[in-house]
Image (cartoon, rainbow, N blue to C red):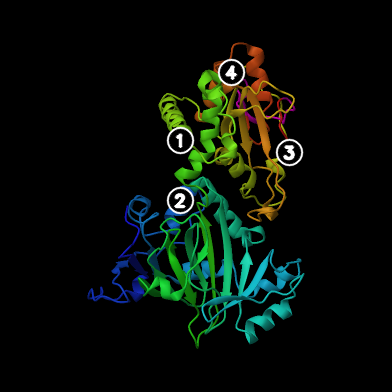
């Protein structure tokens, strides 16, 4: 895999009336980028929000998703420069400088919701006040101190960003956060740094001058500042305008400023895949694998040598651990169900709820009648539900038998999304491990008859489908072909 990205791809899309002859191929910038000028029949359309895949396809259009994940994802930057007034107008609608006045009136706080900062002599200078943000003071710092305003997680308040990020969380299967950066002309908010997330930049207002550098830590797991004398010359340098999109992998060193003599710049950074590496997944599943293996293998249940914790790890202990790891690898090859310790649950607990218009009552209000054995059931909001197997979390159960857990995000709070220390709770159901085949039937089928569920008795089948919340399944009764919602049951409820 190539991480140094000596070349990025620059796509320039133009509306028909503004099409110019293709470039002469001359190299531009500190290091050449392959530039491709595309004549779009109608220009890129505003984002397709009909489905998660449709949204992502339209977000990176005209690049195909297959090309993106093969050539760019986690490898090198992609710059898409567009000349489409329709898309530029749509981007501007996502967040404007003028939106801050109404947002401040809703009770924003420094540090939690807003940061005010400026890059001075290569260092970040934070200009936050204490307590609640007042728009007039914010605007004063912006105009007089040339400070950048960073607004945290605007999807909590801006419906269209909620709609976009909820779909992207479905698409990536990972949390998707965002920050808005508003920088006055002739100023820079942050010094050179790299992030631990995959980054998509959407330019909303004005222009922003970007410089990207070779990664010092490819696919970095942590955020870090980088000194100018350490990063060398930019690998790529360009200016974003409204409607443009920039992608770069985690670990990409970057800095950006608003050119002098122009209006302010506003862009939104949409980020994903934090702590979503194979290493993270291994850490998440290894504890469950050890849990299972220790139940079957007496060697893993044997005690460690006396005083091992009081001395440096010995060569004997290292060899013993190496042998256990090889044994676990062999066992993993034949494992049917991986036990997820936290990743699936954390994703379901902390992601956005489905986008809705109105009060969202349809997500949580039960209706209809109980399904029967003659009913057909199907899963609703499939992208907002995760199924996992893990040890019983009931503290009264000393045997710690494995259970099947189904978590959903339908009752999650939008206003706490990606806010870190805000309290969250899990919503879902738990079932005995003997129910896993029946649950997978519901999980993998567009619709399935209750009678066909792989459970021993009709009572078990009826109990399983009536315990699902109404927001997860629908019922179709053969006798009148009417779609009904499954009422929310109490049995096996975890919250």
Q: Name the residue under label 4.
A: 434
Nearer the observer: mark 2 or 1; the answer is: 1
The residues bearing labels 1 and 3 have C-alpha atoms spaced at a distance of: 56 Å
Using a 10 Å C-alpha cutoff, classify the residue at mark 3 as few (fewer than 14 neighbours), some (14 to 19) or many (20 or more).
few
Mark 2 or mark 3: name the one nearer the start of the chain. 2
Using a 10 Å C-alpha cutoff, classify the residue at mark 2 as few (fewer than 14 neighbours), some (14 to 19) or many (20 or more).
some
Q: Name the residue under label 2.
A: 54
Residue at image point 32% right, 56% down: 2
Which residue is most to the top? 457
The residues bearing labels 4 and 2 have C-alpha atoms spaced at a distance of: 37 Å
Mark 4 or mark 2: name the one nearer the start of the chain. 2
Mark 1 or mark 3: name the one nearer the start of the chain. 1
The residues bearing labels 3 and 4 have C-alpha atoms spaced at a distance of: 29 Å
Mark number, residue 327 = none
Residue 340: percent from left, percent from top = 55, 34
Nearer the observer: mark 1 or 3; the answer is: 1
Q: Name the residue under label 3.
A: 365
SS at mark 3 in the image = loop
Q: Is residue 17 magenta?
A: no
Q: Name the residue under label 1.
A: 318
The residues bearing labels 4 and 1 have C-alpha atoms spaced at a distance of: 38 Å
Which is more toward the observer, 414 or 138? Answer: 138
Q: Tell me if I can see residue 445 in this picture.
A: no
The residues bearing labels 2 and 3 have C-alpha atoms spaced at a distance of: 29 Å
Mark 3 or mark 4: name the one nearer the start of the chain. 3
Using a 10 Å C-alpha cutoff, classify the residue at mark 1 as few (fewer than 14 neighbours), some (14 to 19) or many (20 or more).
few
């Amino acid at each position: 895999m190539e991480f140094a990205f000596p070349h990025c791809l620059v796509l320039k899309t133009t509306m028909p009336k503004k099409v110019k002859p293709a470039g002469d191929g001359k190299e531009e910038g500190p290091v050449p980028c392959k530039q491709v000028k595309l004549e779009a029949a109608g220009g890129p359309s505003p984002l397709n929000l009909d489905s998660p895949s449709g949204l992502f396809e339209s977000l990176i259009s005209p690049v195909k998703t297959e090309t993106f994940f093969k050539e760019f994802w986690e490898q090198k930057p992609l710059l898409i420069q567009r000349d489409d007034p329709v898309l530029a107008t749509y981007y501007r609608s996502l967040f404007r400088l003028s939106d801050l006045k109404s947002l401040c009136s809703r009770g924003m706080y420094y540090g939690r919701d807003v940061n005010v900062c400026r890059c001075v002599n290569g260092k970040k200078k934070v200009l936050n006040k204490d307590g609640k943000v007042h728009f007039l003071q914010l605007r004063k710092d912006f105009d007089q101190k040339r400070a950048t305003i960073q607004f945290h997680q605007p999807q909590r308040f801006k419906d269209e960003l909620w709609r976009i990020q909820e779909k992207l969380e479905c698409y990536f299967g990972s949390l998707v956060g965002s920050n808005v950066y508003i920088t006055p002309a002739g100023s820079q908010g942050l010094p050179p740094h790299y992030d631990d997330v995959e980054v998509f930049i959407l330019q909303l207002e004005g222009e922003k001058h970007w410089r990207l550098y070779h990664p010092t830590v490819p696919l970095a797991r942590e955020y870090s500042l980088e000194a100018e004398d350490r990063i060398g010359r930019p690998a790529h340098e360009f200016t974003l305008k409204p409607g443009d999109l920039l992608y770069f992998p985690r670990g990409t060193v970057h800095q950006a400023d608003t050119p002098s003599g122009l209006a302010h710049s506003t862009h939104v950074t949409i980020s994903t895949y934090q702590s979503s590496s194979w290493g993270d997944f291994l850490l998440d599943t290894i504890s469950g694998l050890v849990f299972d293996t220790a139940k079957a293998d007496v060697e893993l249940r044997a005690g460690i040598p006396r005083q091992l914790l009081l001395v440096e790890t010995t060569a004997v202990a290292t060899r013993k651990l190496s042998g256990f790891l090889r044994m676990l690898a062999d066992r993993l090859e034949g494992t049917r169900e991986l036990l997820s310790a936290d990743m699936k649950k954390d994703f379901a607990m902390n992601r956005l709820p489905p986008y809705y218009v109105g009060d969202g009552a349809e997500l949580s209000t039960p209706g209809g009648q109980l399904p029967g054995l003659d009913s057909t059931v199907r899963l609703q909001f499939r992208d907002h539900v995760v199924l996992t197997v893990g040890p019983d979390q009931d503290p009264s159960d000393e045997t710690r038998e494995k259970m099947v857990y189904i978590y959903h995000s339908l009752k999650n709070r939008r206003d706490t999304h990606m806010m870190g220390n805000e309290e969250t709770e899990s919503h879902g159901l738990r079932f005995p491990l003997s129910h896993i085949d029946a649950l997978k039937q519901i999980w993998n089928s567009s619709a399935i008859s209750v009678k066909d569920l792989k459970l021993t008795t009709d009572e078990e089948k009826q109990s399983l489908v009536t315990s699902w919340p109404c927001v997860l399944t629908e019922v179709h009764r053969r006798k009148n072909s009417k779609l009904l919602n499954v009422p929310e049951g109490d049995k096996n409820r975890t919250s």
